[in-house]
Amino acid sequence: MKRVICINVEGSEDMLVKGKEYKVFKEWCISDSECLYLVQYDELEKDWFLSTRFEEVSKNNEKPKVEDVVNNPSHYKGNKGIETIDFIENVLTREEFIGYLRGNVIKYQSRANLKGRKEEDLKKAKWYSDKLVEVLKDEN
């Protein structure tokens, strides 16, 4: 039986858990690149989900790496591998960068209950808060 890891829960947060392993009971391919998987998402319930929400568990039982969307999101690196936060820090004055960090702490804390990704937003708020403390320590 095929085993998969969920990598995208958008729109199905009440059923799927990102990073959790699921068994595929049936597979129905719509095209060469897109399939539907019948997975059991709790003790009693099964449902169909697009295969793009999952990555297959490798044959040697190693789980694929789940992207760290808080500390190292791949979409925040430019085509030369430079983290956006590093670029922002270099183009802003120290005071502007501190304001930027404070604003992001406020943003992620204030919307944590609104988007269905509370834990992720609170981790992002903590990341920006930790970065702010690091920048303020450099002053002394």
Image (spheres, rainbow, N blue to C red):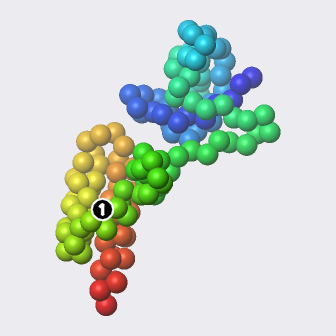
Which quadrant holds residue 139? bottom left
Image-based side of 71 in relation to 3, left or right: left
Name the amino acid type tagged 1. Ile
Image-based side of 33 in relation to 97, left or right: right
Q: Residues within 10 Å of mark 1 (few under 14, many from 20)?
A: few
Identify the residue shown where x is 23% and y is 54%. 107
Q: Quadrant of the C terminus?
A: bottom left
Image-based side of 25 in relation to 59, left or right: left
Q: Is residue 73 visible?
A: no
Compared to 135, does 127 lie above or below? above
Question: What residue did someone put label 1 on?
Answer: 88
Q: Secondary structure at mark 1?
A: helix
Residue 27's spot in the image, x, y percent?
Answer: 64, 14
Compared to 7, does 1 lie above or below? above
Residue 115's spot in the image, x, y percent?
Answer: 29, 40
Between residue 129 and residue 98, name the one nearer to us: 98
Q: Quadrant of the N terminus?
A: top right
Query: Residue farthest to the front?
Result: 80
